[in-house]
Amino acid sequence: MSSNTKHDSIKLDFTVFLNVINGKLVDSSSKNTRRTINPATFEQNPDVPVSTIEDVNEAVKSARTASKTWAGTLWSERQSILASFVDAVEAHAEEFAQMLVKEQGKTIYEARGELQVSIQALRATCGLTLPEEELSASNNLRKVVKRYVPLGVAVGIVPWNYPVFLACNKLGQALVTGNAFILKPSPFTPYCNLKLAELGTYFFPPGVFQALSGEDDLGPFLTAHPGVDKVSFAGSIATGKRVMQSCSSTLKRVTLELGGNDPLIVCADVDVASVAPVVAATAFTNSGQICFAPKRIYVHEAIYRDFLAAMVAYIRNLKLTTEEQVALGPVSNKPQYERVKQFLAEIDENNLTALTGGAHPSGDKPGFFLPPTLIDNPPEDSRIVVEEPFGPILPLMKWSDESDVIQRANNTEYGLGASVWSRDVAQAERIARQLQSGNVWINVPIQTDANVEFGGHKYSGIGVEGGVEGLKGYCNLQIMWTGL
């Protein structure tokens, strides 16, 4: 481990992928492997280990040992080591981006963008601190200090839609606060996550940053393990509930960032020509596979037809490929592909109007590609409005009354994100303050920042990642009393 490791001396082989346990690259104890396919071409990706409970036990044992020394390392030293690791990620960013296209299906431009924001998030995390704070006591006979101490061993369970960014969010906050960290990638996208941990072996002490690849049973092994103190999970509501139930037996700390069915409200005074393309680009980024992307668009009836036409014009320029900038990559995996196709089938079954897309693209081209589909004013109780498709399908609905559209926007079990667009900032903020979402964007595309907390309301999550409050989620609060 060294914060002075030369980044250009590190060579990563993106054809061989192994677990990282106690600073070593290892196969699973069973020697079993699996592989995924490129969702754009159906070409086979390399083998990855299928981890067992024995591998989990070994990783947790190593993490518990390493956490004691790592917690005692000065915060400034942990920041320095993390910063050197980030520099190395940046030095290998193009290799990571190319692999991300192969495993997740993003366009190369989206993959490079994910690496860029991941690096930015890690760098911002390096600058965050949790200093001790002296509190005011009721008399002068004692000193009271509030401090934050690391939990011990943290596990990050990462989904397949943004595997690098979500991993970096979790590992940065866990490590800088003094915890050992075990990364569990999605079975669909294990490759970049394993390489992040491999790169970490050049910087962090053995056992501080580890990664295990496996099947669906690997997550429950980790969430139930008594040697794990914290689980940070991003994924579906259904799986989040199972994670929370599993963690409850040992009272683990839990952070959950779950799904969203995010409303976007467009007021009558917007400049349609400039706003509609931004809304369309945001909604269809990563083929709509973003938990906090707009998924229900409410447009004021006075501009509805013009806005719809502008959206259609933008969408028709999108090409189904991973190689161009104005493009739509495939749905990331077969189960999600089949689920999105069910939504498409309901267009004809329920007499909905699709102005673009609406069916599988013709031809023999491989890949889980689906066309961007825009639904014209579907009923509020239709499945496309009520559920989160997590794919390239987007309903647009009319509104006229402000209180009514707020009620419709809030009429969901989700509460992750929401957006409002209006030239009248006072009106936009009035609407935003009534939306039941953890994050609301006004006149800007969706975005996050590692210096700013991110979390959901309702079923969209528990706790936050990012910012100082995110750091606190990886710590125990300790109040220290000293007599004077």
Image: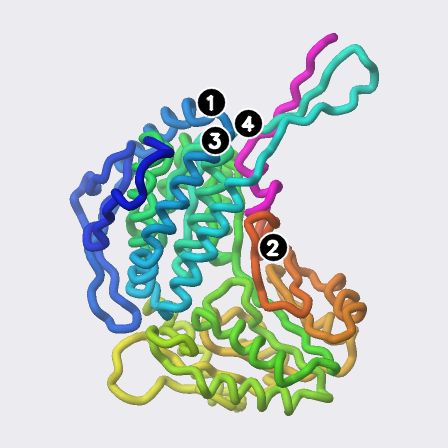
Q: Which residues are magenta?
A: 463-484
Which tag, 2 or 4, sits closer to the chain's start? 4
In the rendered image, residue 462 lying in the magenta stretch gets the answer no
Image position, residue 278 (x, y; %) = 57, 76
- The quarter in which the C terminus is drawn is top right
Mark 2 or 1, closer to the camera: 1
Query: In this view, which residue lies farthest toward the left?
Result: 31
**Label 4 CA crowd tier, 10 Å (few <14, some 14–19, many 20+):** some
Residue position marked by numbered label 2 in the rendering: 456
In reply to whether residue 467 is colored magenta, the answer given is: yes
Residue occupied by mark 3:
178
The one of 2 and 286 positioned closer to us in this rendering: 2
Q: Position of residue 86 (x, y in %)?
A: 41, 45
| Crowd around label 1: few <14 · some 14–19 · many ≥20 (10 Å) | few
Label 4's element? strand
Q: CA distance from mark 2 to mark 4?
A: 25 Å
Residue assigned mark 1: 72
Residue occupied by mark 4: 149
Instruction: Tell which of 221 and 264 is nearer to you.
Output: 264
Horizontally, residue 61 falls left or right of residue 373, namely left
Q: Identify the mark nearer the N-term, 3 or 4.
A: 4
Residue 433 picture location, percent across and down: 75, 61
